[in-house]
Image (tube, rainbow, N blue to C red):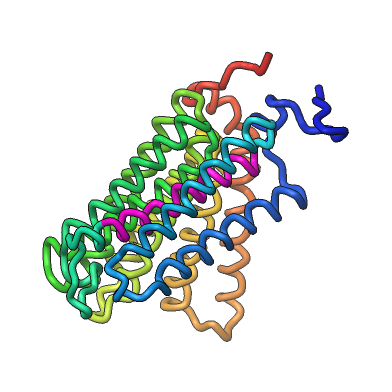
C-alpha cells in the first residue's frame, strides 16, 4: 500500500518499519548520517575553550534542536528512515550540549592536560550515561532501532570512562576487563529483547556487545608478558559456543563473530604447532574450513526447529 504526498509516492508505514532493506537510498541515508555526526562533533571540538562553553553550548544546542525538528517533520511525512536518522543525530549532538553547559557553569574540569580516559571525573561519565538515557528516550518516541546503536556506544564509552576510577591511569587489563563485562551486559540485553520478539531492537546490542567482548579478548592475546592463552583460549571457547547457538537463536551476528574467533584461534594454534611451509599445515587449514562449512549445513537442518523453542516470533503485521 502506498501514499501519495505532493505528487510523489512514499512507502506506507508498515513497509518502512518492518521491511529493512539494503538498497542505494538506505546506504546513502545511513552513510550520510554517520558522516554528519562525525562532522558536527569535529565542529564542536573546534570551538576555542576561551569561549567558556557559551558558543559550544549554543552551537550544539542549535544542531540538536535542528535535528530534532527535522526528525519530527520527516516522521510526520512517513519518511521513516531519514526521520529516525535525524533523531539519532539529535542524540549524537547531546554530548556537545552537555559539555558546553558544564563548561559554561564551570563544572567541567578546566585543566588543559585533563584526559577523561586517564583521570577519573564524574562529569564525563555523567555525560555518557545521560547520552544513553536521552537515546533511550528518543527511541521510545520514534521506535527507530538505529538510535540504540548510539545508546550502546555511549554505554561502552561510559565503561572506559569508569576505568580510571579503579586505577589512574588505568592499565590495559582494566580496560579489557571492562570491555568484556559491559560488552557481555549489552549481549544479555539483546538476548532479553530477542526473547520478547524485539529482534530489530536487539540487533545493535548484539553487534556492539560482541564487538566489545572481541576487543577485550584481542587485547589479552597481545599480552606482552607472553601469556597469550588467557586471550586465545576464552576466545576459542566463546567462538565455538557462538557458532553452536547462532542457529537456535537465529542470529547471523553470532555466526559472524563466531567464525572470526574460531578461525583466528585455531589458526593461531596451528601456526604454533605445525610448519606453515609444509603440506600438513595446508591440510589442517582445509579441515578447519570444511568444519565451518559442515556446521553451516547442520544449523540449516536443525537450527530453525530449535529456534522455535527459544525465540518468540513477532506477531504478523496486519
Task: Give the residue drawn at x 44%, y 60%.
Answer: 59
In front of the other: 246 or 293:
246
Q: Which of 64 and 304 is in front in this view?
A: 64
Q: What stretch is highlighted in magenta?
A: 81-101
Q: Residue at x 61, y 70 (%)?
A: 283
Residue 99 on the magenta segment: yes
The image quadrant that residue 219 belongs to is bottom left
Q: Where is residue 182 in the image (x, y as percent from the top left)?
A: 30, 50
Residue 302 in picture, x, y percent from top left = 59, 31
**In the picture shown, does residue 13 fall above or below 233?**
above
Q: Percent from the top left, x then y, of residue 115?
A: 24, 73
Q: Which residue is drawn at 66% across and 18% down?
A: 317
- Magenta stretch: helix, strand or loop mostly: helix
Frontmost residue, 120 versus 219: 120
Placement of 148 over or under 12, stated as above or below: below
Viewer-side residue, 221 vs 30: 30
Q: Where is residue 152 in the image (x, y as percent from the top left)?
A: 40, 48
Amino acid at each position: 500500500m502506498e501514499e501519495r504526498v505532493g505528487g510523489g509516492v512514499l512507502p506506507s508505514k508498515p513497509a518502512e518499519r518492518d521491511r529493512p532493506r539494503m538498497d542505494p537510498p538506505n546506504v546513502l541515508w545511513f552513510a550520510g548520517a554517520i558522516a554528519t555526526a562525525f562532522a558536527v562533533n569535529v565542529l564542536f571540538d573546534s570551538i576555542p575553550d576561551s569561549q567558556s562553553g557559551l558558543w559550544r553550548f549554543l552551537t550544539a544546542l542549535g544542531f540538536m534542536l535542528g535535528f530534532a525538528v527535522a526528525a519530527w517533520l520527516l516522521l510526520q511525512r512517513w519518511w521513516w528512515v531519514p526521520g529516525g536518522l535525524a533523531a539519532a543525530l539529535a542524540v549524537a549532538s547531546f554530548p556537545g550540549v552537555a559539555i558546553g553547559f558544564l563548561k559554561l557553569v564551570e563544572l567541567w574540569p578546566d585543566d588543559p592536560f585533563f584526559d577523561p580516559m586517564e583521570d577519573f571525573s564524574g562529569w564525563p561519565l555523567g555525560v555518557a550515561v545521560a547520552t544513553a538515557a536521552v537515546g533511550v528516550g528518543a527511541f521510545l518516541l520514534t521506535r527507530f532501532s538505529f538510535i540504540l546503536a548510539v545508546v550502546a556506544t555511549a554505554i561502552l564509552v561510559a565503561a572506559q570512562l569508569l576505568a580510571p576510577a579503579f586505577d589512574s591511569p588505568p592499565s590495559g587489563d582494566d580496560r579489557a576487563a571492562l570491555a568484556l563485562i559491559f560488552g557481555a551486559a549489552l549481549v544479555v540485553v539483546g538476548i532479553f529483547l530477542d526473547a520478547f520478539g524485539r529482534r530489530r531492537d536487539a540487533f545493535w546490542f548484539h553487534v556492539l556487545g560482541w564487538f566489545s567482548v572481541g576487543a577485550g579478548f584481542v587485547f589479552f592475546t597481545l599480552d606482552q608478558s607472553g601469556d597469550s592463552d588467557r586471550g586465545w583460549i576464552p576466545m576459542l571457547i566463546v567462538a565455538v559456543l557462538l557458532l553452536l547457538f547462532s542457529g537456535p537463536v537465529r542470529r547471523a551476528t553470532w555466526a559472524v563473530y563466531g567464525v572470526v574467533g574460531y578461525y583466528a584461534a585455531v589458526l593461531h594454534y596451528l601456526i604454533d604447532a605445525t610448519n606453515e611451509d609444509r603440506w600438513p599445515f595446508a591440510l589442517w587449514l582445509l579441515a578447519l574450513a570444511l568444519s565451518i562449512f559442515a556446521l553451516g549445513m547442520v544449523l540449516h537442518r536443525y537450527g530453525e526447529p530449535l529456534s522455535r523453542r527459544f525465540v518468540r516470533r513477532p506477531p504478523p503485521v496486519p
